[in-house]
Image: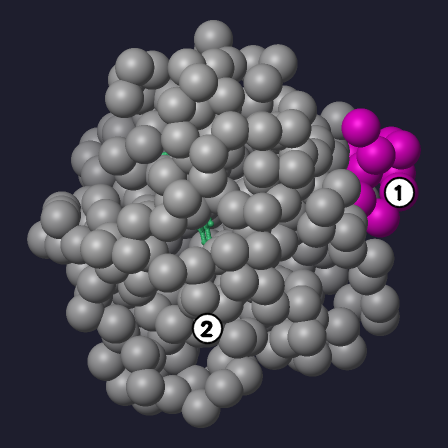
Amino acid sequence: MSAEQSVILVTGGTGLIGKAIQYVIETEPAGSRFGKKPGETWIFIGQNDGDLKDAESTKKLFEKYKPTHIIHLAALVGGLFKNMKYKLTFLRENMLINDNVLHWAQVFGCKKVVSCLSTCVYPDKVEYPLTEDNIHLGLPHESNFGYAHAKRMVDVMNHAYKEEFGCNFTSAIPTNVFGPADNYDLEGAHVIPALIHKCYLAKKNGTPFVVGGTGKPLRQFIYSRDLAKLFIWELREYDSVEPVILSVGEDEEISIKDVADAIVKAMDFKGEYVWDVSKADGQFRKQASNKKLLSLIGGFEFTPFDKALQESVDWFVANYDTARTGKKTV
Ligand code: NAP
């Protein structure tokens, strides 16, 4: 990105990752690698600003803000159980959102779009660690095939837009993200925010902290504020259509049991803590390589998991009344 005037539109700007990008842009020193640069205007939008499933509403957002660059995060997102229940909705809504954003970005001549995929979109049966070139080499896990197919199409569209129109559209592939301002709604939340919310309620109500599954699956978790910096880097410094995995290292996989233990500690929960093994585990592991990222960015210091988790738990406890918790009595 050059120092000329630029308008960076962040779709999904009101969500977990969008808010983290806003936090980083506003708190890192101005002009620094991850801080706000001279000539930049950052705009963070959510569903209240316009429904990206709707082509006309999306067009109006482009007319209003005239973005030169886009970080496209907006999506219908959810944890394992919501993904299993609403496969068609996940497929259709995400395809509509992605098609509208990329179409109008091309029509309005945006210089760059970085869209967001996920390691959930990879084939179920694939060689580990996951790398940027094996996204399409097999069917996704059946638990999330709607979401996965819609997201994979973004990579397909990016290549087609480049070939047909010469667009500079690319994508990022984060592993599991967590941090302040997550979605803690127990019906739709990802594992860390769901467990933070459950543990909070167990402590408050004096009830057992019940964790679904066996605790054995392994995951790489990235702190949203670290991921935010990597998105800013990708927007400014990376110029290729090929996606980049944005993740902590392969050796930093941790089990769901380790996550639950860490939440118990961070929440200072002293009550009964049990496992409900009748609940599904989902995909066993999704180990992803961050070699490409590290070779391009030239080194990056990730926040240690325990510190990031403590900050996330502290944020939830301090903001319980306004956090996205769904029904608070569940
Ligand atoms: P999130 O907290 O649930 O936020 C979703 C964002 O999308 C919100 O800003 C929401 O707006 C917006 N949105 C949803 N439907 C929309 C629509 N029809 N029109 C306009 N905006 C819409 O999600 P997140 O966790 O930050 O995820 C952001 C991106 O990262 C997604 O593309 C997701 O697939 C990807 N990702 C997430 C994870 C993870 O672990 N969280 C991992 C890998 C990849 P409102 O706030 O107004 O509802």
Residue 301 in view, yes or no? yes
Residue type, numbered disc 2:
Lys
Cβ(mark 2) to ligand 1 < 8 Å?
Answer: no
Point out the frontmost of discs 1 and 2. 2
From the viewer's perspective, tell me whether residue 16 is left or right of residue 141. Answer: right
Q: Considering only vertical position in the picture, is 42 above or below 248?
A: above
SS assignment for the magenta stretch, majority: loop
* Image quarter of the C terminus: top left
Q: Nearer the viewer, residue 288 or 309?
A: 309
Q: Residue at x 51, y 29 (%)?
A: 271
Q: Earlier in the sequence, mark 1 or mark 2?
A: 1
Q: Point out the stretch of residues depicted in magenta.
A: 27-41
From the viewer's perspective, tell me whether residue 51 is left or right of residue 303. Answer: left
Q: Considering only vertical position in the picture, is 170 above or below 182?
A: below
Q: Which residue is denoted by mark 2 in the rendering? A: 286
CA gap, disc 1 and disc 2: 33 Å
Q: Quadrant of residue 55?
A: top left
What element does badge 1 sit on?
Answer: loop
* Colour style of the rendered protein structure: one colour
Q: Quadrant of residue 244?
A: bottom right
Ligand 1 shown in quarter: top left
Q: Which residue is denoted by mark 1 in the rendering? A: 32
From the viewer's perspective, tell me whether residue 315 is left or right of residue 189. Answer: right
Where is residue 166 shown, x and y percent of the image? 46, 70
Q: Residue at x 10, y 53 (%)?
A: 88
Mark 2 is surrounded, within 10 Å at the Cα level, by few (under 14), some (14 to 19) or many (20 or more) other residues, namely many
Where is residue 251 shown, x and y percent of the image? 68, 75
Where is residue 256 shown, x and y percent of the image? 49, 57
Q: Nearer the viewer, residue 244 or 6?
A: 244
Q: Extreme left residue here? A: 88
Residue type, numbered disc 1:
Ser
Q: Considering only vertical position in the picture, is 308 above or below 285?
A: above
